[in-house]
Structures are given as structure tokens and as C-alpha cells.
Image: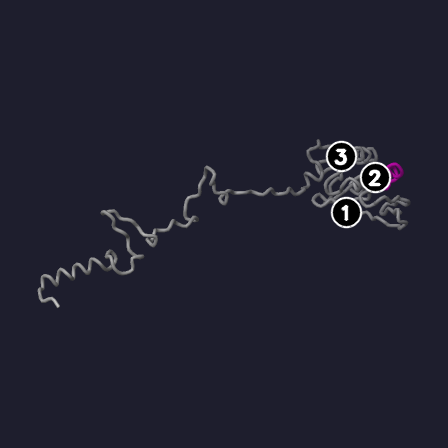
Amino acid sequence: MKHDLQAFSQDIVALMKMSGDSGGSGDTSEKPLLHNDFFVPTRETIVSPLKNEWGQCPTTRGDRKTSEFEWVTPGVPSVPTATTNFEEERNAQVFEGNAAGWHAILQELKRMQAPEWAGADRWSQVVGDADCFLSNWDRAACDLGWTALELFGVHPVAPGCRYDAMGLTMLLGGGTVFVLTEQTAAFRRPSGSNLTYRRKPMSGAVLLCGGQHAIR
């Protein structure tokens, strides 16, 4: 045991230098190495981590361009409207409210392409039915007071499915009219069934050849 206080103090200082975070004793894995006054971090030295990638500004050029931030706008399919249904880009016409005007409407139908709501087969059937009806009943229908809308009318927004607004030629479906009166038209379908069309108010309907057309 040492009784020299100065020597004892020097021993304590030396011991403190050899222990702790910078001393030579203790867990050396937690300490840096000092070599010729240079600081050399050990493999256990804690290194400040990089910021989270989501918090960094995305690379906007080069090979590491961030694709996650690129906006992709999917295409939106178009929806048919009354304009596309009736080809309203065609010049508007005013048809006579008689047999001659009905035949002019028929010629307009023949020049038109099949509307989206009808399809080629159905449209061909409608035009053929209208042609057959006018060939046999045009003058009789005119004398009995039938109108263009009662023959060629359709709903302006849902022309292919609103049967309450359809004129006679839209409903024949390949059938042949065999009786025509002031109020009704009886026709026979290809299946052999007999049906009757009754005249009704058509104030909300438009012409099959296009809503821009009118009747004089």
C-alpha cells in the first residue's frame, strides 16, 4: 500500500486513462482506436443512418429516376350521347308532313351509318321495314292522319330501348303490316305472331334520322 499521496494520485489518473470510453481496458469493441493521434473508427462505431428514402427528394434524372412519382392518367372511354346517336353533325333538314316527306326521311336513313345503339343488323332491319311499309301504305297512312313521328319516332336520349317513344317502323322487327286504321296498325312477325301498334302522343320523340331534323 502506498502512503505517498502524490504517487497515489498519479496512479488513479493512469487508471482512469486506461478505462472508460477511451482507455485501453474494458470492452474494446465499443472504443475507437488511437494511432499516432489519428482517429480510426472500429467496426462497431455507430454511423448515423441515412434518412428514409420516402423523405428524400426523388431523383428526376439519370438511371435512378423515381418512377413511383410519375402520374399515369388512364384513358376514359367515351359514352355515346344523343349527338353521336343521331349524327347531329349532318345538315338539318325540314321534311314535308306527307308521303313525299316520309320518303325523304327514308332516303336520309339509307345514307346514314348504323348508329351505335342499333348495330348494323338491327339498323338494316329498321331501314328495310320502313322501305317496305312506305311502298305499300304511304298514301293510306297519310290519308288516315298518321304522322312522321308515329312512323319514325325515337326517344332523344335512349332511342334503342325506350319502346314507349318508338314509332311503328322501329317495332316491326321484320314484320309486315296487313291492316291499317286511323288508330292502329296490325302486323305479322316472321315467327307468325300478330301484333298491334296503337297510335299515341309522341311529343317527346325525335325523328329516327336525327333530332336536328324537323317536320314542316
- For this view, does 6 lie left or right of residue 208? left
Colouring used for the render: one colour
Q: Which residue is drawn at 13% across and 60% down?
A: 10
Nearest to N terminus: mark 3 or mark 1? 3
Question: Looking at the image, is mark 2 or mark 1 earlier in the sequence?
Answer: 2
Going by the image, does 46 lie left or right of 166? left
- Which label sits in the foreground, 2 or 3? 3
Ranked by sequence position, the earlier of labels 2 and 3 is 3
- Quadrant in the picture for residue 15: bottom left
Residue 37 is situated, as x and y percent measured from the top left of the image, at 22, 47
What residue appears at the point 23 percent right and 47 percent down from the top-left corner? 36
Three-letter code, disc 3 = Met
Comparing 40 with 137, the one in front is: 40
- 153 inside magenta stretch: no
Q: What residue type is labelled 1?
A: Pro
Give the CA distance from mark 2 to mark 3: 14 Å
Q: Which label sits in the foreground, 2 or 1? A: 2
**Kind of residue indicated by mark 2:** Ala
**Residue identifier under label 1:** 201
User: Within 10 Å of the Cα at label 2, are there few (<14), some (14-19), or many (20+) other Cα atoms?
Assistant: many
**What secondary structure do most residues of the magenta stretch adopt?**
helix
Mark carried by residue 112: 3
Question: At numbered mark 3, what does the secondary structure look like: helix, strand or loop?
Answer: loop
Magenta residues, start to end: 131-145
Front one among 211 and 110: 110
In space, the residues marked 2 and 1 are separated at their CA atoms by 20 Å
* Residue located 27% across and 52% down the image: 33
Q: Residue 186 carries which label?
A: none
Circle 2 sits on which residue? Answer: 130
Residue 150: horizontal and vertical position, in percent?
Answer: 80, 43
Q: Where is residue 155 in the image (x, y as percent from the top left)?
A: 73, 45
